[in-house]
Image (spheres, grey):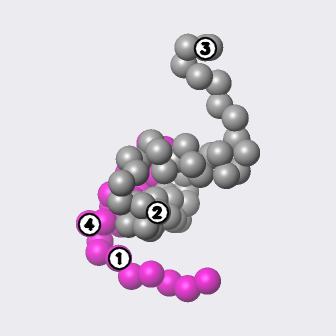
Amino acid sequence: MGLVKIDDDLHEQVRRASTVMCRSINAQAEFWMKIGMLAESNPTLAFNDIVRAQLDAADVRLASAAAA
């Protein structure tokens, strides 16, 4: 594990987003980094497709909106 230096303004955005998303600041930053890495590796996929693929890989089954 290491340290990552980020701009103060970006850190503030991470802090605010972490509050909304009920994540720690570190977890929010890690989420954004992971999604960013996956988006660069899969430029044709939309955000929702990336998240769905990650949920499928973790064997998470979500109810569809129609079933709710």
Percent coordinates x, y for residue 40 in the rendering: 38, 66
Return the residue nearer the eye: 66 or 45.
45
Tell me where the magenta segment starts and ends, as one range: 1-21
Percent coordinates x, y for residue 33 in the rendering: 45, 66
Q: Is residue 48 visible?
A: yes
Residue at image mark 1: 6
Q: Marks 2 and 4: which is nearer the front?
A: 2
Distance between the alpha carbons at the discs numbered 3 and 1: 40 Å
In which quadrant will I find the C terminus?
top right
Main secondary structure found in the magenta portion = helix
Query: In the figure, is residue 12 to the left or right of 42?
Result: left
Distance between the alpha carbons at the discs numbered 2 and 4: 24 Å
Q: As shown in the figure, which amino acid type bears the numbered disc 3?
A: Ala
**Residue sticking out furthest to the bottom:** 2
Q: Marks 2 and 1: which is nearer the front?
A: 2
Residue at image mark 4: 9
Q: Is residue 22 visible?
A: no
Q: As shown in the figure, which amino acid type bears the numbered disc 1?
A: Ile
For residue 38, the mark is: 2
Q: As shown in the figure, which amino acid type bears the numbered disc 2?
A: Leu
Return the residue nearer the eye: 24 or 28.
28
Q: Marks 3 and 2: which is nearer the front?
A: 2
Q: Marks 4 and 3: which is nearer the front?
A: 3
What SS does tag 1 mark? loop
Q: Pick whichever of labels 2 and 4 is earlier in the sequence.
A: 4
- Whether residues under marks 2 and 1 lie with C-beta atoms below 8 angstroms apart, the answer is no
